[in-house]
Amino acid sequence: MLWGHALSQTMMHREIEYSVARIGLGRQLWRWSASLSGVSIHGQAMARADAIAEAERAIDRALAPNKVSWIYGRASDEEPYR
């Protein structure tokens, strides 16, 4: 997932490989990208540290187990109180 830039780096977070690369000439704009189970996630930030943090948060969200939403104190897959 490198964009052919001299300033690109591949890193690992929670056993997922992701890339961070500086894009544009003279601008501090950084692009990040990762692939999980065949689905590509990507974004950009104004600073390298922000791009790394955003990539790692996106990976954490993608790997998080599905959360059960509660309605009236019961799981949403159950019949709500009447």
Image: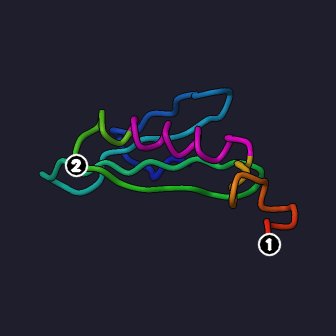
Does the CB distance between marks 2 and 1 fall below 8 Å?
no
Residue 54 sits inside the magenta stretch: yes
Q: Amino acid at mark 2?
A: Met
Residue 4 belongs to the span the image colors magenta: no
The residue indicated by pointer 2 is 46
- Circle 2 SS class: loop
Q: Tell me the quadrant of the picture where the C terminus can be found.
A: bottom right
Q: Answer left or right for 8 relative to 14.
A: left
The residue positioned 30% from the left and 33% from the top of the image is 49
Q: Position of residue 28 (x, y in %)?
A: 18, 47
* Element carrying mark 1: loop
Q: Residues within 10 Å of mark 2 (few under 14, many from 20)?
A: few
> Residue farthest to the bottom?
82
Magenta-drawn segment:
52-65
* Residue nearer the viewer, 22 or 79: 79
Say which of 47 and 10 sits in front: 47
| Residue at image location 59% in from the left, 45% down from the top | 61
Q: Which residue is mark 1?
A: 82
Q: From the top left corner, tell me how far across and down residue 69 is, in percent.
A: 69, 55
- Residue type for callout 1: Arg
